[in-house]
Image (cartoon, helix red, strand yellow):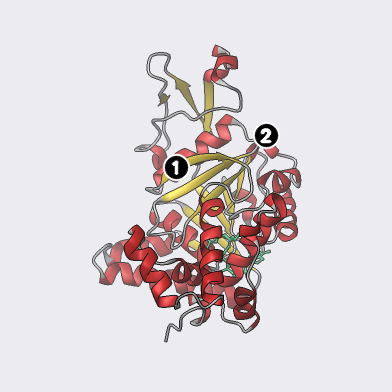
Amino acid sequence: MNIKATKSKQNGTANVLTPPKPYARIVNGIFPGNKPRSQTSRDEEIVVLMKIEKIGVVGCGQMGSGIAQVCAQSGYSVLVSEVNNELLRKGITAIESSLDRGVQKGKMTPQERGDTMSRLKGAVGTADFKDRDLVIEAAVEDLDLKKRIFAQLDKVCPAEAIIATNTSCLSVTAMAAATGRPDKVLGMHFFNPVPAMKLIEMVRTDATSPATLETAAAFGRSLGKTIVITRDSAGFIVNRLMIPQVLDAARMLEAGLASKEDIDTAMTLGLNYPMGPLALADLIGLDTVIFIANGIHEKLKGPHYVVPALLQKLVAEGRLGRKTKRGFYDYD
Ligand SMILES: NC(=O)c1ccc[n+]([C@@H]2O[C@H](COP(=O)([O-])OP(=O)(O)OC[C@H]3O[C@@H](n4cnc5c(N)ncnc54)[C@H](O)[C@@H]3O)[C@@H](O)[C@H]2O)c1
């Protein structure tokens, strides 16, 4: 099950002795452990990477479906779970449509599309996760729910399995504490839409072992993603910086300082952003923006993380963004 990587004394890179197939092209870096380098003894410079072949994904919404898709596309066996058959069907249909678009655009062949789908299975609940090497939780942004899911996964998954969360801002440490394996828990924060976005923030807690971090990072690279590492703190890197901007854009709109189009055009052309903050909020999901803002505000308390009334009103009206075809903008 395990492979060994040793850190070269000359250049600090990891040499995988017997790489499993999915890792053949990606394991070539070593990541910082929990101790400062000066305290790391030579003995501890041996990191055992786990062989990852079978992936579980919890939740098949916007993010879970994207994560399941890129894992299956990269050659992994994927089991994705939802709360009921209807939502599972909806999520799998979204994956099929995304792959169809890939074929239409010439990014993959019909054969590759078929192979990807053959590696992907769905389930209601997590009872079948008992053979998974790595599980990525992508359920809604609610800490109590995530803690319950982590406790459940801890019971079902093999003792050596890594359990990751795609949370946008919540405490990975709290989720790890709901398990008996905090050393094997970390955040793997993908970005939306997952097939297109190149980044994964790897979030390590004080308990995350170097082997877990490095295995997850190697896995992330095998999906073609770039990895950054951050300690567990509210909003990590991207959302801590991005959420105040989205909320301030909503506050400007609310105060009548500019139209939504002009706010977005100003940020797109003025800062060379691919889209403005209000269009970005629609893409993320306005309900998810509120979950993230509240999650960060609970920890950091800054006024810039307070959700403006306009955003709350849109969500109360069911205008959740692109996923409901209505948000700041209409998407008909
Ligand atoms: N939307 C984004 O842009 C974005 C980006 C990065 C990270 N995230 C994070 O990803 C996670 C999911 O966000 P999303 O945008 O995909 O939300 P979403 O609402 O589109 O999907 C969440 C899915 O989880 C399912 N779910 C809830 N409880 C479940 C359970 N016990 N078992 C299985 N499935 C369950 C829901 O039915 C739903 O389909 C959140 O933690 C969010 O903060 C979101």
Q: Earlier in the sequence, mark 2 or mark 1?
A: 2
Q: For mark 2, does the 10 Å Cα neighbourhood hold few (<14), some (14 to 19), or many (20 or more) residues?
A: some
Can residue 151 be seen by looking at this rendering? yes
Mark count? 2
The numbered mark at residue 329 is none
Q: Marks 1 and 2: in contact by CB < 8 Å?
A: no
Which residue is at 25% across, 69% downward?
105
Which residue is at 48% across, 39% downward?
217
- Judge: label 1 CB < 8 Å from ligand 1: no
Residue type indicated by callout 1: Ile
Q: Which quadrant: the N terminus?
A: top right
Residue lying farthest left? 106
Q: Which quadrant: the C terminus?
A: bottom left
Can residue 141 be seen by looking at this rendering? no
Q: Position of residue 260 (x, y in %)?
A: 45, 76
Question: Quarter-wise, where is residue 287 in the image?
Answer: bottom right
Question: In what element is the residue under mark 2?
Answer: loop
- Judge: label 2 CB < 8 Å from ligand 1: no
Residue type indicated by callout 2: Ala
Q: Is 183 placed above or below 268 here?
A: above
| Image-based side of 264 in relation to 327, left or right | left
Question: In what element is the residue under mark 1?
Answer: strand
Which residue is at 60% across, 77% downward?
310
Q: Position of residue 117 (x, y in %)?
A: 42, 64
Pointer 2: what residue?
207
Q: Position of residue 151 (x, y in %)?
A: 74, 51
Q: Position of residue 125 (x, y in %)?
A: 67, 64
Q: For mark 1, does the 10 Å Cα neighbourhood hold few (<14), some (14 to 19), or many (20 or more) residues?
A: many
Which residue is at 41% across, 70% downward?
264
Pointer 1: what residue?
227
Q: Is 246 placed above or below 133 here?
A: below
Question: Quarter-wise, where is residue 124 in the image?
Answer: bottom right
